[in-house]
Amino acid sequence: PPFNRELSTAAHRMEEQPNFASLIEDLQRKEAKHVWHPMTQQRSWSCDESKPPAAVHYAHNSTLYSLDGSTKLDAMGGLWCVNVGYGREELARVAYDAMVQLPFLSPAHGSIPQIELATKISDLLDWSAPAHAYFTASGSEANEAAFKIARQFHAANVEQDPSGPLRYKIISRHRAYHGNTAGAMAATGQAERKIGFGPQPPGYIKVGTPYPYRSRETEAQHGLDLAASLDETIRMEGAETVAAFICEPITSGGGVLVPPENYLKEVRKVCDDHGVLLILDEVVSGFGRTGAMFGHHHYGVTPDIVTLAKGLTSGYQPLGACVVSDRVFANFHDCPDAVHQGKVASTLPPRLAHLRSINTYGGHPVACAVGLRNIEIVEREGLVERAAEMGAFLKRTLEEAIGAHKHVGEVRGRGLLVGVELVADRDTKTPLDDDACGAIVRRCADAGVVVGRNASTVPGLGNVLILAPPFVIEEHECARVAETLRAALDA
Ligand code: PLP
């Protein structure tokens, strides 16, 4: 592979070893013995002859290079996060400089990169008032913070809303994935992700997710129906007990589902009617993935809280953020005068009115410096526009190659967030069975193309192939993805 030898010195040293093959095997043996991978059945490595694939040691643009000389086109962009593509030396140098300058600072203090990044995010969100960022180290923690902030916001809101202190419930959607920590997992639907981990914390309620392909209504009616069902759920739960509703603007892991155009606006209205905060999880959709800087920019809706991660640094550093509106921020106020003047009528003593949550690595100066430069690259190279254009090209290419295939129900998505729903029968829309879907993904991998899939037997989850490549993917690479999928489907 045309890799930069300076940058991949470890691999360089290995390639010069005369017993290179045995080094690969040694790594495979140690990996099978000592590394526990997520969402992977590894026991088979110790019971049969199989072993982990040769380690990936280098990546450039959209391609992964393994020690055994094989390459893979990464049509999943890592975990839909490597938006600017692999191998950006510029980001490595920024990280180096930032670490030399300030390797760590307590998140209770403002490092220059943290201050600049929070300001940049506020500018990009382009809400009518300044936004305020609480940094974390991951998307799960950003959602966790959002739930705490929503509850504490209401506790401090008795003046405007006497039921504030009673509001603790979080409503989310059955198809949602919001993360792996306790609260984020409780807000996650997709039961298979939680089996064996119960009991779940109480107070997390689920409603339906827009799914136009499987709805019998017009898109507009489907949007209205789902918003009406949210409205009914809030009423039945008791609006005075509900703190927030959380959803992704465009569902990613839950089946790549683009909602009807009217859905988010209707949801915003329902939330406003009941004094419920709207949290938008933009961990996947943020920073250009759907062809707009943020998913909610497509729909003319402003949330109260937005959560971010992944594309914030393009995965080059672990970083998340929970960003709140000025109205939400204003309620975290311990100024005795404000309490005295009745501006804040919190149930909390004023000395506890600030957000009492902390992450050691939240807003890490190195991660924030990388995040800032990553956003600069996205803007400088027009990558949001490119995601929109290449996304349209990828969808068109897929339509031509497999749109009429008997096992393809729908090709859908927005920007470079694309899903292919596989069916056994196009008329009945019966999902293609789990084994066949798994085999298709494996065939693509064997042919050198990484395609994603939610490991689930639930219709609309496991039978949807996921494509979320880096924004720098080229047209010929999109064509290769489509061709590889067609061959895998035929097989
Ligand atoms: N929210 C969404 C929509 C996600 O897809 C994910 C992860 O894939 C998360 C939250 C959790 O983010 P993290 O894995 O960084 O904790």
Image (cartoon, rainbow, N blue to C red):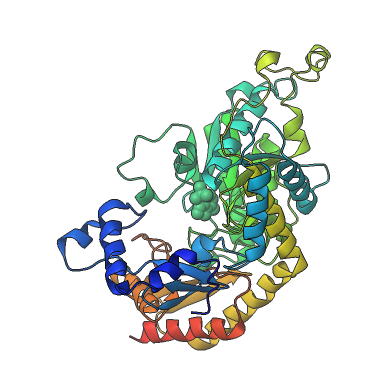
**Quarter assignment of residue 168:** top right
Q: Quadrant of the C terminus?
A: bottom left
Above or below: residue 363 compared with residue 387: above
At x 57%, y 39%, the residue is: 361
Residue at 62% from the left image edge and 61% from the top image edge:
221
Q: In this view, does 85 lie to the left or right of 447?
A: right
Comparing 256 with 182, the one in front is 182
Query: Is 187 left or right of 361, judged from the image as shown?
Result: left
Q: Which residue lies furthest to the left in this view?
A: 47
- Left or right: residue 251 compared with residue 424: right
Q: In which quarter of the image is residue 41?
A: bottom left
- Please give the name of the residue rendered at 37% of the width and 53% of the height, measured from the top-left corner: 38
Q: Position of residue 410 (x, y in %)?
A: 50, 75
**Image side of residue 483 versus residue 41, left or right:** right
Residue 364: x %, y % from top left: 62, 42
Residue 103 or 381: which is nearer the viewer?
103
Q: Position of residue 391 (x, y in %)?
A: 62, 74
Nearer to the camera, 434 or 379? 379
Name the residue located 73 percent from the left edge and 27 percent from the top edge.
Answer: 331
Residue 432 visible at all: no
Residue 476: image location, x then y, percent: 57, 86
The answer to whether 341 is drawn above or below residue 451 in the figure is above
Residue 362 visible in rendering: yes
